[in-house]
Amino acid sequence: MTQEKLLMKALSMDIITAKMFTELDTSITKAFGKHGQELIFKGLEAYGLKDAEMLAKKATAEGENHTFYNYLPFEIEGSLQYAELTPFARFSKMFAFIAKEVVDVYGEKGQLAVKEAVRIYGEKRGNGIAQRARANGLPNSVENYLNNYDMGRSDLFKIDTIYKENAIEQTFTHCPLGQQWADDNMHEYGILYCQAIDPAVAYGYNNNFEVIHDEYVLKEGQCHFIFHMEDK
């Protein structure tokens, strides 16, 4: 009997942003305790509490559990700053403002805490991508990675993708996440995400999936990846 294919919607960027915030909260709190939480709040203030509340409400409405509300007052004055920006830009700004507070105080230890948050967040997303494939009766192989990806890639991403034997080569000539960090002069904080995210998502999807990321939008002006899988 042929298995009926399920239509898998991409996760909204509000959900994805809430997932990222929750892992930043967990990792930074684990590393730096109450002071880490104070820095997270400062990052949210710099981002804008009203904008953070909007993200929190949208993610909650879509069924995502998160820790935004641990930091947000019940009533927040003021107006939205970033409502007109793309959801990718809002993700980038939220991430950078929090990372900046932690890294500027704790230096390399702060960088490690932020990258650990990205690693855990990425691996959980990779687990989810594998689950999306499995729900449609597909193995977590190279060829099923991108067509079961959890984040929508809008026209704001300019990507060249080449499938090879047991591998995928991708070149991003434009990435709205990296572009926002560049526009905001937040290179040193955004790069922490870029360095950790794709290996983590790939590993979560399949422990034999390896990523070579040898060019970055924030350094070379484009991102270049080779995703490779070997049987082990």
Image (spheres, helix red, strand yellow):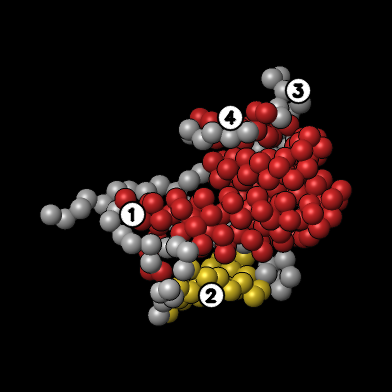
Q: Is residue 192 visible?
A: yes
Q: Earlier in the sequence, mark 2 or mark 3?
A: 3
Residue 32 to residue 148: above or below: above
Give the distance between the C-alpha atoms of the residues marked 4 and 3, in whole angstroms: 16 Å
4 or 1: mark nearer the eye: 1
Q: Position of residue 6 (x, y in %)?
A: 29, 48
Residue at 69%, 20% in the rendered image? 74
For the residues labelled 1 and 2, say whether their Cβ atoms are less than 8 Å apart.
no
Mark 2 is on which residue type? Ile
Q: Is residue 161 above or below residue 30?
A: below
Disc assigned to residue 57: 4
Q: Image check: 122 left or right of 90? A: left
User: What is the distance, in whole Å, between disc 1 and disc 3 at their CAs?
Assistant: 45 Å
Q: Nearer the viewer, mark 4 or mark 3?
A: 4
Q: Which mark is residue 70?
A: none
The dot on residue 226 is 2
The amino acid at mark 4 is Lys
Work out whether residue 42 can be spotted.
no
